[in-house]
Amino acid sequence: MQGTFRFSFGPWNIHEGADPFGPEVRKSIPFNEKLEYYKKLGFDGVQFHDDDAVPDLNNKTHEQIIKEATELKKVLDDHGLVAEFVAPRLWMDPHTIDGGFTSNCPKCREYALNRLKTTADIASAIGAKNIVLWLAREGTYIRESKDPVTATERIGEALQMVLDYNKDIRVMIESKPNEPVDHAFIPTIGHAIAMGLMTNAPDRVGCLIESAHAILANLCPSEEMGFALAHKKLWSVHLNDQNGLKFDQDQTFGMVDPRRALNQVRVLDKHGYGNNGEWIGLDVKVLRTQKDDVCLKHLEYSRKIFLRLLEISRSFDDAKIEELIGTRDYEELNWYILDAMLK
Ligand code: 3MF
Ligand code: MG
């Protein structure tokens, strides 16, 4: 069974290039102008944070938020674009200094739960069926500062709350082992999938796998994907690349290790990813050194590289691979794969 591939990214994937050590190096591009680039670059899906969709959330009434989200849906329709998901940006607000759902401050936990409800409302208003939870600050810097059992239960309660609040949405948990926290409570995709079992609607809790996040956990992204696919929980991906155990680099897909990228494409394609509407999200960042006029190439090339790797994967002779597996000649199998990639 082959996959079906449509591509998405978020407005944060076109940006100014600031990092913790320096200022912005490119002009910012207004949101509406960003939307113009999607189709030109070969993308049909838009991923949102709640405040990408409706900026300045804290200072708007619920009614205003829904009105603006509904207007946004029209703009997306006009561009022929589809909203893939909405994710609460639970790491920028002063209420989330110590985390959201697992904060030690009850008022801050309440803020996080309300923000999650708003995210669900925005998702429904812009026609997205999915919420993404990247649990950025749900973890610790000082182990004794949070009880891990209580914290896990609190994340489970947040999931249950939003599943009850809006019966139309599904939640996709995006695991990441560290950054910005030292130790995250949901570091791998196994943890993410297990979280669904703490709710009474596990069929509405799935996951989003980001290549770099698997690599940061010293895991193989295509094996993480295989695990989630076997559990029928792989509902989205953030493909990118990562040069070992450093900060989260969000490099162009396949930039560091094209073979590791090939194996991600291959597992997705072999298991019919996309046939139920799942998107190929490319969570890639432009290199800080790119100038304004060439600041979209990371998106264009990530998609191109995906499609080239798909061609290579589909050109493999499955019978030949089976034969090599049958004779246990894995050295020859290695040559067969590398030879095709190096042609
Ligand atoms: C963090 C990420 C984020 C999330 C996004 C959606 C900027 O490492 O990968 O991308 O994917 O916030 O939750
Ligand atoms: Mg991501």
Image (cartoon, grey):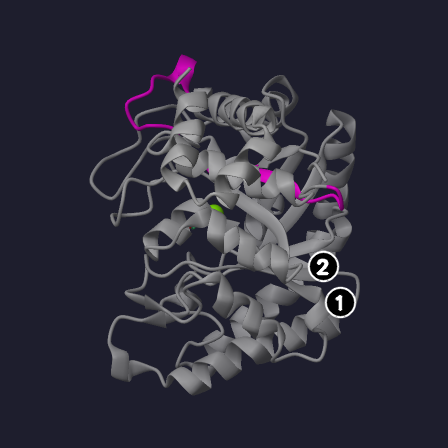
Q: Is 335 or 328 nearer to us in this picture?
A: 328
- Can you give x and y, in whole percent of width and height, for residue 277 in the image? 74, 43
For the residues bearing labels 2 and 1, Cβ distance under 8 angstroms? yes
Q: Could you tell me which residue is drawn at 44 percent across and 63 percent down?
A: 188
Of helix, strand and loop, which one carries label 1? loop
Q: Quadrant of the C terminus?
A: top left
- Residue 315 is at least partly visible in this image: yes
Q: Nearer the viewer, residue 129 or 255?
A: 255
x then y, percent, for residue 187: 41, 64
Q: Amino acid at mark 2?
A: Asp
Residue occupying the far front of the picture: 327
Q: Which residue is mark 1?
A: 166
Residue at the spot of label 2: 121
Choose mark 2 or mark 1, whichever is in front: 1
Q: Amino acid at mark 1?
A: Asn
Q: Residue at x 33, y 32 (%)?
A: 256
